[in-house]
Each structure stands twice: as structure tokens, then as C-alpha cells.
Image (tube, helix red, strand yellow):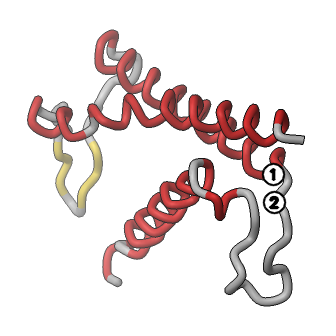
Amino acid sequence: MANGGWYLLLLSGLSMGLALLTLGLVHHWGERIPGWVPGVRGRTIPARAAAVPALVGASLVIGLCLYAVLNMTFHFVDRGPVLVGQHDVERTPPGPGIVSLYVPLLAWGPLVLAVAANYWHRRTLAR
């Protein structure tokens, strides 16, 4: 892929994979390894192994969203010129149309935090 477009595919695949893993916090396959997985089928997934990464990930998403909102409000980072080829191009802040596409991300962190906390309580109280 020309111009480093490979990282977009990697980032998209990683984010989709992590998003799908959050389904394990609410579905039964998040408690036991499915039968189609060879060698480890039917084993119980430790509650800590699923809840801790989910809590850490949710906290990171909340922190990134908080930083983005505060940066857009108070302009912590100055958007200076960026070298593109042989010309300096001034970055313009994203318009409201682009920003509106990221609004659901503000809810993702708190929702994953709530689901991970529920998973932890459900799994540890079931013992």
C-alpha cells in the first residue's frame, strides 16, 4: 500500500476486533471458551482476564475523549503547518459535520466501563 495506508487497515482491524470482544462481556461465550476452539474448548474464562483489560480500555477511551473535548475547547495543541510533499499546508480544524461523527465515541468509554463492572460483579458474585 502506497503512502502508509497499511496502518489504516491495521487500526481498523484492531478497533473492530476490540469492539467485538466487548460482546463477550454480555454474551455467554465471554464466560466459557466456545466449543469450536480446539484444545481449550469449554474452559472457564477467568473474570479478571476479561474485566481488567475492558476496564483499562474503557478508561483510556474516556481519557482520550476528555482530552479531545478539552483540546477543542481550550486549544492546548496549536495546529501549525504540516509538511506535505514540497508545500506547507495549514491544517484547519474539523467542521461540525466531521465532529458529529465522533460524538458516539463519547459514550463508548462509559458504556464499556459499566458493562465491564457488571461482568465483574456477575462473575464474582456467581461463585
Q: In this rendering, would 95 be left or right of 74?
A: left
Distance from Cα at disc 1 to Cα at disc 2: 7 Å
> Furthest-top residue in view?
74
Image quadrant assignment for residue 16: bottom left
Instruction: Give how far across and how far down residue 23 sits, in percent.
Output: 53, 55
**Up/down of 89 relative to 39, above or below:** above
Q: Residue at x 65, y 43 (%)?
A: 54
> Furthest-bottom residue in view?
38
Q: Which residue is mark 1?
A: 49
* Label 2 secondary element: loop
Q: Amino acid at mark 2?
A: Ile
The answer to whether marks 1 and 2 mark residues whose Cβ atoms lie closer than 8 Å is yes
Image quadrant assignment for residue 68: top left
Instruction: Give how far across and how far down residue 55 sits, in percent.
Output: 67, 36
Q: Amino acid at mark 1?
A: Ala
Packing grade of label 2 (10 A; few <14, some 14-19, many >=20) is some
**Up/down of 85 relative to 57, above or below:** below
Numbered disc in front, either 1 or 2: 2
Most foreground residue, 7 or 22: 22
Q: Which residue is mark 2?
A: 45
**Up/down of 44 relative to 94, above or below:** below
Q: Quadrant of the C terminus?
A: top right
Most foreground residue, 58 or 44: 44
* Label 1 secondary element: helix
Packing grade of label 1 (10 A; few <14, some 14-19, many >=20) is few
Q: Residue at x 49, y 55 (%)?
A: 19
Most foreground residue, 63 or 30: 30
Image quadrant assignment for residue 96: top left
**Up/down of 54 relative to 83, above or below:** above
